[in-house]
Amino acid sequence: MKLNIRSLRRLAVVSLTLTVLSGCTFISDPVSKMKLPQLSADKATLMAAINSFNPPGSTLIRPANDDDSSIFTEDLNKDGVMETIVFYETPDEAVQIHGMILEKKGDSWVKKLVFDGDGTVLESVDLKDVTGDGKLDIITGYSRGEEKGLVVYSYSSGSLEEVLTLPYTKYIMDDLNEDGIEDITVVSFKRNEFATITTYQYNDGFNVLDKLDDLDPYFNNYYNIVAGKVAEDKEGIVLDAAVDSHSAYTYMVVMENNMLRVVIPGDARTFKDQRIDSEDIDGDGIIEIGLLEPPKGWEYFDPETIPYFNSYYKWDGKDGLVFTSQQYRDPADRFIIKFSPEWHGNLTVDTKSVQNKSLKFIMSDTGETVAEVSFFSSLEWERVKGAGWEMLGRDADKIIGYRGKLEQSTNGGSSNKIASPIERKGIDE
Amino acid sequence: MIKKGMRRQIVLHYILVVSLALLLVEVIFLLAIRTNYYDSVYNKITTHISTAEYFQKYQILGEHAPFQLQDLLDRFSLSNTELEVLTLKGDMVTSSTGFQPDRTITTSDVPEAAGGSIGRWVGKQPGTNESVMAVSKILQIHGRDAYILRYLTSVEGINEDLLNLTLLSIGIGVAVLAIVVLFSFGLANSIVKPLNNITAVSAQMAKGRFNTRIKGNYKYEIADLAATLNYMAEEIVRSNQTKDDFISSISHELRTPLTSIKGWSETLISGGYDPEETKLGMGIISRESDRLIGLVEEILDFSKLQQNEMKLSIGIVNVKVLLQETILNIWAKAEKKRIVLLLECDEAIYVKGDANRLKQVFLNLVDNAVKFSHEDSSIVLTAQRFSASETAIIVRDSGIGISDDHISRVRDRFFQVDALNGGTGLGLAISQQLVELHHGKIEMNSELGKGTQVTVILPLTDELPSSMIVTEGQL
C-alpha cells in the first residue's frame, strides 16, 4: 500500500512536470489565431490576380451610388468569356482613380487594360447596354469637388473607347421614348444659373434627343430624382427640388414624341414644408409624389409641433394629381404609420397628442380612434404589453408602442434602406 | 506477454484504472480548452460589435444623411474577419471582400440574430470547406432592425492548436501510462515475489521439513502470512514432540505396572508358596492390572472423544450430590497428603448431562488438585449459580500452580508440565472435551507457586422432574 501511494505521487509529479514544461508553449491566445476565411477558389484566383496587377499602395474602391461591391464580373463584350472590372485609388498620384479590366483565360485572369478616371471620387458605376449593340457599356461618374463628369465607355476586342463625356448633376438611364434602346438623361443644375434636362440617344454616336433648358434654376438643389413609370404605360422622371433647408417642390417630366414635357410643374400644388421623397409608396410600380397635409383642427398650433401627414399622389395622365395613400412618418424616422386610403380626408390627429410622447389618430366625423402611438419606458412597457400594444420600434431608452386597426410592419421604414440603386442614386447633395 | 498470474492481473488493473482516469481528465480538459478557445473568439467579436454599436448610435443619427454601406463596413469591420451585411432574411447585401453579393446565408446564426440574440455558428464554409465561426447580430438604425451583421473568421488555426493540444495530451497520457506500467511492475513484484518465496518454503514444509522458516522482512498481510506459516511449522514440530513425549511416557506408564506384575508372577512361579507372600504378590498384581486397565480406559475414552463416538446417557444431575461423591472417591488419596477437601455448594443446582462422565471430569480436576497440592493444604470445591442459565463449579487449590507459558497448553492432548510425574497427559484434554459435549466450558486461572483455580461452567436446566427424586433416592 505504501509503495502504491509513493508510486502514485511520483507519477503525479512527473506528469505535472511534463504538462508544465511542454504545455506553456501550446496554450496560446486563440484571438491571435483568428484568420480571414478563405475565398472560394474562383474568387481567390481573381483576388490574387487583382492584387498582383494593382500598383502597390492602391486600394480598391466602391462607387458611391452602389457600394455593395468593388469587383464587377460580367461578360462585357458578350463573347462568352467573363470580364472583371475594378476601380482602385492611388491617393498620391496625379491621376487618382484608375479602372482595370481583366479577362478570364482558362482558370486564371489576365490584365487587359488600365484606364484613368477623371476625378477624385468614383460617384457611380453602371454596366448597361446604352448603345444598342447587345454589349454592356461601362457608365461611370467621377467627381472632383462640385463638378461631376459622366463617361460612357464601350469595351470591345480588348480596347476601351470613350463614347460619351458630359458634365452632369444627375444622370438617369431609362428608355424614355420607349424605342427599346436605353437612353441617358442628364440633369444639370447650377443654383440661380441654369437647370437643364437633356436626353441622349445612341445612334452611331450619342445625339441629343431633346433638351429642356427653360426650367427655373432658383432653388437649392435636387435632393431626390427618380425615373420609372409615372403612369400605367408612361415612363417619366420625377425631380424633388429643395427650396431651402425645409421646403421643397416636385417636377414631373415625361417624353412624348421624342420631346420632353413638364407635366407637373414645381408650383404651389407640389409645394411642401418638409422634404418628402417621391417614390413608389404603394408598390404598384408607379411613382407617387409626396405632399404634406396638416391634420384638421391644428391650424392654430405652432407649425413645429403639428403632426403632418404624408399624402402621396400620382399623375392622372393629363395635368392633375390623384390621391393614392396616406402615412404618418416620425420626424426622426423611427416609425411609419400607414393608413387606409378610405380614411383620407376624414382622418385627423387628436389635438391633445404630443410628438415623441403619444399620438392619437381619430376620425374627425365619429371621433373613433383608429390608431395610437405611444412612447413607453421599458418598465411601463412590461405593464401594457398585453393590452393590445405592439412594439413599433425603440429609441434609446424608450419603446414605441402601437395599437390600431391596421397591422403595421415593425421595420417598415427600413425597406428604403435596402433600396434599388436607382432610388439611392437620387440622394445626392 | 507476461504469463498469467497476479503480476499480470495487477499490471492490467493498473493500466485499466489509469487509462480510464487519464481518458476522463483529458476529455474534460480538451472540452474545456475548446470551449475556452471558441468563447475567446466569440467574445472578441461581440466586444467589437458592442463597441462599434456604441459609436454607431451617435453617428448615424443625422436625419437624412445618405446611408452608405461603405461607411458601415468601415465602422464595423474587424481585422481577421470577413464582415457580411445581410438583410433580415439572410440575403447578402454586401461583404468586406468587395465581391458582388451572390448568396443567401442559411446557417443557424442568422435566424438567431434575427430573433434578437447574438447568433453563433461553427461549421464548414461551403465552397472552401474551411472551418469557420460565424457571429451574427442585428443592427438597428433609427431604432429599427435594419441589417444583420455577420462576422466570419476562420478557426482553422484554432483547430490546429486544438489538434496539437490533443496530440500532446495523448502523448502525455501515453508517457504517464508507460510510467504507470513500470511502477505497477515494481508493485506487482513487491507482492508476487514474497508470495512465491512463501510458496516455496511452504512446499518444503509440506515435504516434512518443518525446520525451514520463511525469512525476509515482509510487511503487512504478507508478514502476517509468513508469521502464521512459521508459527504453524513450530506448532507441528511441538505437537510432534508432545506425541513423542506421550509415547515415551505411556510406555513408561505401561511398563511400570507390567514390571511389577512380571516380577511378582515370576516370584510366585519360582518361589515357595508362602501364603503371606503369595497374597501380597497377588494383591500387587491385581492393583497394577487395575492401573493398567485405568490407563487403557483413559486412552480409549480419549480415542472415542476424538472420533466423536462418545455416547452420553443424559439425565438430570444434582451437582451437589455429584461433588459429594467426587470428594468421597478422592478422600483416601487426599488423606495421605493430609489435604482437606471442602465443599461449598448452593442448593438445587441441576444440570442436564451424563452423571458418570461429569463425575469423571470432577474426579480428574480434584485428582490433579490433590496431585499438585502441598501437604497440609486444602482444596475448595464451590458450586454456585453463575448467571440465570449457567452454573459455575470451581475447584481451587493452593498448590504449585502453572506458569503462564504452560497454562495455555495444559489442555492440549499429551501435554505434561513434567513428563516424569506419571499419567498420560490426557486427563484434562478428556475433561475439556466432555464439558464441551455438555455445552459447557472450562476456564483456568493459575499463579505459579500460589495455586490454581479451575472453573467449569455448565448450562443449568429448568426441568426438575421425578429424576431429581430418583437421584436423591440413590443417595
Image (tube, rainbow, N blue to C red):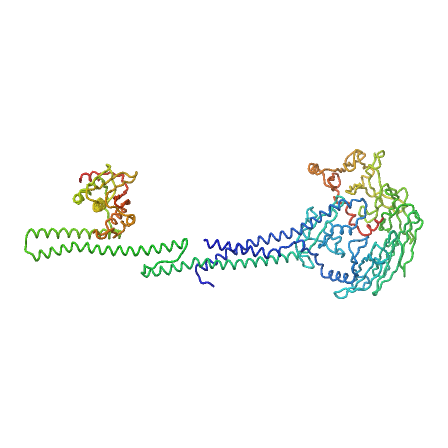
Q: Residue furthest right?
A: A214
Is A333 left, or right, of B392 in this rendering? right
Where residue B9 sits: x, y (%)? 46, 58
For residue B184, above or below residue B399: below
x and y percent of residue B243 in the render?
26, 55
Where residue B353 sits, quadrant-wise, is top left
Residue nearest the viewer, comparing A31 with A350: A31
Relative side of A250 to B137, left or right: right
Q: Nearer the viewer, residue B98 or A182?
A: B98
Q: Nearer the viewer, residue A147 or B86?
A: A147
Quarter of the figure with residue B391: top left
Seen from the viewer's position, the closer of residues B22 and A68 is B22
Asked if one can make out residue B313 in the rendered structure from this viewpoint, the answer is: no
The quadrant of the picture occupied by the C terminus of chain B is top left
Left or right, residue B135 beside residue B335: right
From this viewpoint, which residue is outermost toward the front? B449
Residue B383, image x and y in percent?
Answer: 25, 39
Q: Is B204 situated above or below B429?
A: below
Q: Residue at x 39, y 60 (%)?
A: B197
Looking at the image, how many numbered discs can be counted on the residues? 0
Instruction: Provide residue B126's location: percent of width, then percent of height.
Output: 69, 57
Q: Is residue A202 visible?
A: yes
Determine whether A404 is above or below B285 in the image: above
